Amino acid sequence: MVNEESKPIRLLIAASGTGGHLFPALAVAEQLSDYEIQWLGVPNRLENTLVPESYPLNIVKVEGLQQRLGIKTIKIAFNFVSAIFQVQKLIREQQIDGVFTTGGYIAAPAILAAKLQNKPAILHESNFIPGKVTRFLSRWCSKIALGFRGTAQYLPQVTTEYVSTPVRSQFLTPQNLDLAIPDNAILIVVAGGSQGAVAVNQLVREVAPNWLDKGAYMVHLTGNNDPDVESLNHPHYIHLPFYDNMAGLLQRANLAISRAGAGTLTELAITGTPAILIPYPYAAEDHQTFNAKVFVEAGAAVMYPQASTTAEILQNQVDRWLETPETLQAMATKAQELAIADSATQLANSIRSMIPTEINIKYN
């Protein structure tokens, strides 16, 4: 006698490190509530805080290769090979049907293990310039989902699909802001991404009193590594290492001063927040500059390189905007034109198309 029983799809999500990798993956996972999800991460990174309350977290020891060969390179290579075997074992034991990853070095063992186990792998590349893992391993992926339309030119031999970058569900509905900021006040938000940005912090603090004295308010997300975090005090100035309600903060903001990570730019687009972008100058292959150019060309932001940006340049730019709020409103409209609000749904549907429903057949 043969009984057929539907088996839930089991997906392994490999996303690790910073919010730029984790938040899009979490947004997609929310759309796959009918899937059984296992998570793949590394020790001591953000996923160890954000993931376990929702999904089983599996840890492998893997890290990026160093530029110089040495003893540590051998250890990294050994851990990498070991991670591939660990992920293969996980796929077999948990009967994983497919792998989804948002890139970074955690993606490499996940994609290779999926290939070795003959399982489909879908990778989302959020940056305009594809990362090394994307370029090297994309041939073994079923599909590459893109955060920027123009990225397809760098992956000519691969099936790609433009979906933008998913944001957390909070960004798609109005959020209340629990900070003491008057409704009619201009609000400037300064954010350096999930790692903070000390150089940007220092630059902003030089000129912030000018804007604050003119009546503007500022919420400054400093990160945890800023030695001068207590150096500015003003009744209109709020400094925090991080803030959980970024959706509400950007929805309320009139202007952001920010790095140009793909996740941050997507949030700025969804919330229609004009921005001054100061790309992180040491990002791999200067990818933040290429990300920022898309927003500059669309009229949604201006960009200043960190090395040549002075306090005077920054002050003059913001002063002009404070005197012409209609300019900021026009930029806000341009930012929203770049947004794809249902990116997470589109990406989830792409995953569903790559991982067909299977049937468990039980014999009695």
Image (spheres, helix red, strand yellow):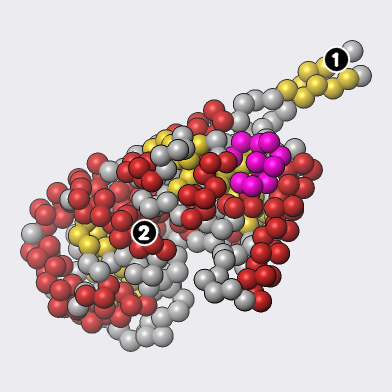
Residue at screen point 32% across, 43% down:
150
Helix, strand or loop at mark 2: helix
First along the sequence among labels 1 and 2: 1
Residue at screen point 71% across, 39% down:
117
Furthest residue toward right? 364
Q: Quadrant of the C terminus?
A: top right
Residue at screen point 63% across, 71% down:
73
Is residue 295 visible in the rendered structure shown here?
yes
1 vs 2, front mark: 2
Front residue (pair 347, 189) = 347
Residue at screen point 38% across, 46% down:
154
Residue type at numbered disc 1: Val
Q: On the image, numbered disc 2 is attached to which residue?
A: 287
Residue 226 in percent (x, y) is at: 41, 81
Q: On the image, numbered disc 1 is attached to which residue?
A: 2
Q: Quadrant of the N terminus?
A: top right
Is residue 61 visible in the rendered structure shown here?
no
Front residue (pair 34, 170) = 34
| Number of disc labels | 2
Instruction: Write the start and end of the magenta stretch as one range.
Output: 111-122
Residue 310 in percent (x, y) is at: 19, 78
Front residue (pair 26, 59) = 59
Furthest residue toward front? 69
Which quadrant of the figure has residue 99? top right
Whether residue 262 sits left or right of residue 52 in the image: it is: left
Residue 89 in percent (x, y) is at: 77, 47
- In this picture, is 364 found above or below 139? above
